[in-house]
Amino acid sequence: MIVVMRKGSSQKEIEAVAQHIRDAGLRASVSKGEERAVIGILGSPYPELKDALEALPGVDQVLVVSRPFKLASREFHPDDTVVKVGGVTIGGGDVVVMAGPCSVENREQLLSTARAVKAAGATILRGGAFKPRTSPYKFRGLGEEGLKLLAEAREETGLPVVTEVMSERDVELVARYADILQLGARNMQNFVLLDELGKASKPILLKRGLSATIEEWLLAADYILQHGKSQVILCERGIRTYETYTRNTFDLSAIPLVHKLSHLPVIADPSHGTGKWYLVQSMALAAAAAGADGLMIEVHPSPDHALSDGSQSLTFENFKLLMEKVGPVAAAVGRKMARAPVAAPARRRAR
């Protein structure tokens, strides 16, 4: 159930409704929009509760939500959620671009990439310090050293950083360095990790699972949202099908569909969605046209020598070409490209 308060209802009335819900042994999640507040009821409410709540002062109506996901639904939060991080707004109408290497390999590789993607117009730096790999024998990231390099790149360029968390024991460590914590596709239904990320102070980027339905994806978002966190970003990154010519099948239709179902911002990852560098540009443009709030693009100074996902990574020049084309496409559907934040003056190093 969802309790819709009247316009202008007081904080006292809102709290009284929330307390009535708690007294019934359920949990109340309050969401305040521009005009009115909505209270989501978490748990299994009994049928008579609807009538009891509708009789309380300040209540406009009580809706029975049929969708299994509650907090991620538009019924609970009609207005679009906007995530703000490091001077960048995600979900406010502008198209943000998160770009960088799949894996942080060394200082020069990361810094040169950070400079190149910012010069081309990227607004957020991506890079993996901890890498989930299908094979245990492949490069699995630099760990905390990679996080330190990402923080150094942020200090130089001013770009906020997004990087993946693989384990609940690493949430605090990654949050110390990163601006956005990414939950990768392989961990979308790692429910312990979802709960821990819901308690974190940083925004969460939730990637769709390898073969997850949209319902399962939004239910995973509810695990994070139920802790009172509102700063969640969804990422469509392709799903596994019977097709073998691409790494995954990029579900372009998921972008407008999820926007209809959910208030959360949706970005697209055509790099993982296709697995082919020569398909990334066309799918990025299509995602922007479909209404994506952002793009996540893998970029490497020398993709042929990348330690992970070189086949889907763009060179600096190809990324620049993509950025030159995506702006006009965004403008054609009434949107504009987000601008990168200005870097703070470099600090003098102690001698």
Image (spheres, grey):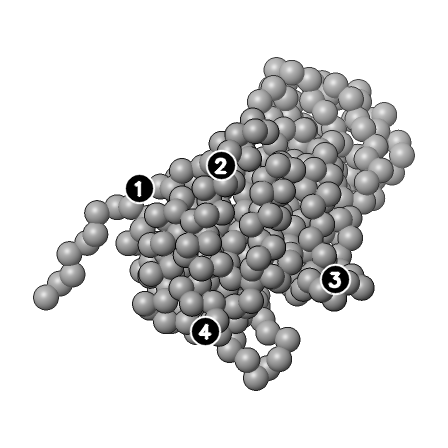
Which is nearer the N-term, disc 1 or disc 2?
2
Q: CA distance from mark 4 to mark 3?
A: 26 Å
Q: Amino acid at mark 1?
A: Val
- The answer to which quarter of the image holds residue 279 is bottom right
Mark 1 crowdedness (10 Å alpha carbons): few <14, some 14-19, many ≥20? few
Mark 3 crowdedness (10 Å alpha carbons): few <14, some 14-19, many ≥20? some
161 on left or right of 283: left
| Residue placed under numbered mark 1 in the picture | 342
| Residue placed under numbered mark 2 in the picture | 327
SS at mark 1?
Answer: loop
Check the image and name the residue furthest to the top: 8
Q: Amino acid at mark 4?
A: His
Which is nearer the N-term, disc 2 or disc 3?
3
Indicate which disc residue 305 carries.
Answer: 4
Whether pointer 1 and pointer 3 mark residues with C-beta atoms closer than 8 Å, the reply is: no
Task: Say whether residue 188 is visible.
Answer: no
